Amino acid sequence: MSEAPQLRVIGHVRSPWPEKFGVPRQSGLTQGLEARIELDRELIPVEALRGLEGVSHVWVLSWFHQCTSWRPTVRPPRLGGAARLGVFATRAPHRPNPIGLSLVRLLGVDDRTLRVADLDLLDGTPVIDIKPHLPWAEQPSDARCEWAAEAPEPLPVRFAPAAEAMLVDASERAAIVETLRWDPRPAHQRDDPERSFGLALFELELRFTVDERGVVVLAITRSEAARGSVHGAGGGAK
Amino acid sequence: MSEAPQLRVIGHVRSPWPEKFGVPRQSGLTQGLEARIELDRELIPVEALRGLEGVSHVWVLSWFHQCTSWRPTVRPPRLGGAARLGVFATRAPHRPNPIGLSLVRLLGVDDRTLRVADLDLLDGTPVIDIKPHLPWAEQPSDARCEWAAEAPEPLPVRFAPAAEAMLVDASERAAIVETLRWDPRPAHQRDDPERSFGLALFELELRFTVDERGVVVLAITRSEAARGSVHGAGGGAK
């Protein structure tokens, strides 16, 4: 029995988000956006995944490696950034043990790689466990969370002509819309209507603002050196 | 960024089960049986729990401290102990990182102690995180797990006269029924109808068998020295 247990990293996330800004705030929001879990081939034999083909949704337990400190209370973006809640009443990543719990749709398994949708994790995030979701045990009909009772409302997203001209295909456009429609701006930076924000997605650099009608993508830049991402071979979180 | 992250134990479980035999195989089964999560008063300020009063169900992340080894495949009791599945397709406690994920009903919070129902953890289990369950994100309507599609069927439980005579109150009887009706016997020990089993529950030692009509509680012994349990002051898992 160990009172200070040591974790093993069993794999890593490959997702569209190379930086924290823009990562979805909860799993299940960015429907259809694909990501991968690449398990460590040295540590995990392929038999350890046998039977996952009969499972529709899995829990991904991860380690928020960029969250190294925590405070007893946090200000959830959902509450406008003003109200404070205890960290254990929220899903904030800065926790005594910065463990992430993400419910994702399992699209397929190829050797030691899981293809998933609806993930909410930074590219390069260490993975520590995969478990099947059990609907009969984990969907209580009378469950409620008063301060976050329903899914957030997405914003409409539109593209300025200069941004529209940079789009290569429909899946790229869909990924941009899925990421921006949940309004990634910090609550305390939402007051200035002139302010624009930069956000990395795959190898793209987006610039956007938010007006009274929703999100406007102002510009899209394609970076020359593709970073480590779901499209790249390796890399990790910046 | 640490590639081999160190966990902090933030508290411990106080449950009716001082030994592994008899611990429910999933959360949500033993409805109404109360347990406690006692958070570490040195590490966790009371503000860290603020807001939990508006949350009906929480995730308890725990460390299966008695599960120190793992194998790529396991034989789930649910499948009769014969079929092998990959460990990541099951909720078996022996995993690369033996982390438990239990959805429990939150009955109340008193200072640093959470009163919960439906827990499936050994008395003394280290706790590593508490998170609110978010129904809108974590109850996908089309979820399925083919090999464990529905809740298991409970067995009827009856008491032999000698056992009946030892019962003190209705809550004790309910705790015995809740624990035994899920048939704690290992799959490979279910063939011999003459066999009886011993099981510890609070400070009770139960002896039971299973016949064609269900579980029969043959005898109940009350141990002199109350062990560490939900009724005791301290103690831990044996």
Image: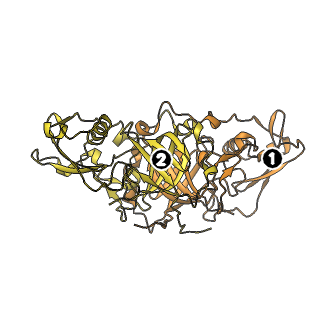
Chain colours: A yellow, B orange
Please tell me which residue is depicted at 55% across the width and 54% down the height of the picture.
B36
Q: Amino acid at mark 2?
A: Val
> Considering only vertical position in the picture, is B145 above or below A77?
above
Split into 4 quadrants, where in the image is the N terminus of chain A?
A: bottom right
| Mark linked to residue A153 | none
Give whichever of B143, B55 is nearer the camera.
B143
Look at the numbered disc 1 and give the secondary structure of its residue.
helix
Please tell me which residue is depicted at 14% across the width and 48% down the height of the picture.
A196
Split into 4 quadrants, where in the image is the C terminus of chain A?
A: bottom left
C-alpha separation, residue under disc 2 versus residue under disc 1 = 34 Å
Q: Amino acid at mark 1?
A: His
| Mark linked to residue B58 | 2
Residue topped by disc 1: B188
Percent coordinates x, y for residue B117 in the rendering: 56, 45
Please tell me which residue is depicted at 35% across the width and 36% down the height of the picture.
A151
Percent coordinates x, y for residue A39 in the rendering: 52, 54
Nearer-N-terminus badge (2/1): 2
Percent coordinates x, y for residue A90 in the rendering: 38, 50
In the picture provided, is B25 more to the left or to the right than B206?
left
Give whichever of B180, A70 is nearer the camera.
A70
Q: Is any atom of residue B208 visible in this view?
A: no
Task: Tell me the crowding category of disc 2: few under 14, some 14 to 19, or many 20 or more residues within 10 angstroms, Cα based.
Answer: many
CB under 8 Å between discs 2 and 1: no
